[in-house]
Image (cartoon, helix red, strand yellow):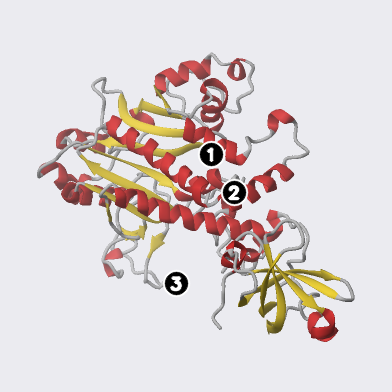
Amino acid sequence: MRRTKVSDVLKSDEIGKEIVVKGWVRTRRGSKQVNFIALNDGSTIHNLQIVADVEKFGDELLKRLTTGSAISVTGEIIASQGSGQKVEVVAKAIEVIGDCDANEYPLQPKKHSLEFLREIGHLRFRTNTFSAIARVRHAMIFAVHNFFTSKGFVNVHTPIITASDCEGAGEMFQVTTMNLNNLPRTEEGKIDFSQDFFGKATNLTVSGQLEGELAAMGMGEIYTFGPTFRAENSNTSRHLAEFWMIEPEMAFYELDDNMDLAEEFLKYLIKYALDHCMDDLQFLSQRLQEEEKGKKEEDRSMELIEKLRFVLENDFIRLTYSEAVNILKDSKPNKKGQFKYPINGYGSDLQSEHERFLVEKHFKKPVILTDYPKEIKAFYMKMNPDNSTVRAMDVLFPQIGEIIGGSQREENYDKLVNRMKEMHIPAEEMWWYLDTRRFGSVPHSGFGLGFERLMLFVTGMGNIRDVIPFPRTPKNAEF
C-alpha cells in the first residue's frame, strides 16, 4: 500500500478506509488501555492522531515511540472523538523506521527559544515554527515565478561569479583558485590575478541587476531570482551574508510603470500567502502573540494576518524624498529627540525608524518614496532634470521599513559615463554595460526585492536568520 500524506488524511472524509502513514512522532500520551500518538510528516502544521491499543502493541514497542522517532502506521480512518481534528487513525500495525533516544534528542516536546534552535539548525525543520516557515517560503517562491510568468516575463539566470560590483560598495567575497599561502605577484608587488582561474579578479555577485539589464535590452521584460552575497561584517537581525534576490528589469518602463509593477507584485504575493498558507500563518500569528504577551500594548506588533491584509487593502502612498524629510523633520519623535538618527534636513539617509514612522504613524499605509538625492544612490539611476535627484523608488512596509529598492536606469550614454566618472567607476571595465546605451538604448527600469526581507514580513519573524534554512553570517557557516 502506498503512503498517504498526513495533510491528505486530515482532509479526507473516507471513513473506514485503510491507509499507510509515515512520519515522526511529536508526542505520545495515554492510559493503560490506549495510547495517542501525534504524527507529523512535514506536509502540514497539523498532527495526525494515531490511536494505538496498548494490549495489541505492548509496552515494549510503544516505549520506542518517543518524540523524534520515525514510524510507519497501517490503520483505518475513523471520525475523531475529540476536538481539534475531523479524523484520526486507529492503528492496525506500527513499525519503527528510526529510533530516537529520548535522553539524547535536543527537541523535547516543550517550547524552545529561537536562539537555541539556531544552534541546532540541522534539526529545526522538525519544529512547528520552522516547518511552517519552510512551507510559506516554498509558496512564496512558487508565487514569484507564477506572477512573472503570468505577465510574460522571462526568467534569466545571471552569474554568481562575476568581475563587476553592481553597487560600488566593495563589500564582496573574492573568488580564487590560487594558493593563498603562495600568491603570485606582479613586479609592483600586487597580486597577479592574470594567473588566476578567470585571468582577472572575481567575486560572488552582489546583484544580478546589471546582467539583467542586458537581457531586458533584448527580451523586453525579464526577472532574476538567485543568491546574492554581501561581505558586510554586520551581525544584526536584519543582515545575511548570503541571501536571495528577485530583480525584474523592464525595457520601456519609466518610474511610474516601475512603481505600479512593484505594488502589484507585492499585493499578489501577500494575497497568495493568505489564500494558500492560512494554517501556517495562523500558527505563526499565535506564536508571535505569545512572544509579545509581556510587552506594552503600544510596543506590540500588528497581528500578522491583520498586517498582511493592511497591505493588501490599501493603495500605496507615493511621495518624494524631500516631502518625506520635511514630514520627518517636523515630526514629534524628531523634535523630542526620540529618533536614534535625528533628521536635520535634506540629504539625511533615511533609517528603518524613519521609514516605519512614515508607514505606521503618519500615513498608516504602505509608502513609496521617490526622487532621492543623487549622492546617496547608485551610479546607474536616471538623473532628474534638476540634476540633483535621481528617479529612485523605495517601497516601505510596516514593521520592516524598506522592502523594495529600485529605479529608472540611466539610458543616456554620455550622462551615464559622466556619472561613473563622478563616482570613480572605471568605464573601461564596464564597456559591455555601456554598449547597451550605444546600440538601441531605451528607457528602462527595475527593482530588487530581498526574498528574506519579504519572508520576515509574511511570517512575522523578528530575525532574518530564522527565515532562511541555513543562514550565513559573520563567523557562521555551519552545515
Residue assigned mark 1:
308
Report the number of numbered marks.
Answer: 3
Q: Visible in this render: residue 242?
A: no
Q: Amino acid at mark 3?
A: Asn
Q: Please determine whether, in this image, residue 319 is positioned above or below residue 82.
A: above
Q: Visible in this render: residue 192?
A: yes
Q: In the orientation shown, which residue stands out farthest toward the right? A: 32
Identify the mark nearer the N-term, 2 or 1.
2
Element at badge 2?
A: helix
Residue assigned mark 2:
281
The N terminus appears in which quarter of the rendering? bottom right
Q: Could you tell whether 161 is left or right of 76 in the image?
A: left
Identify the mark nearer the N-term, 3 or 1.
3
Q: Which mark is residue 181?
A: 3
How far is disc 2 from disc 3 in space, using C-alphas?
51 Å
Element at badge 1?
A: helix
Q: Amino acid at mark 1?
A: Leu
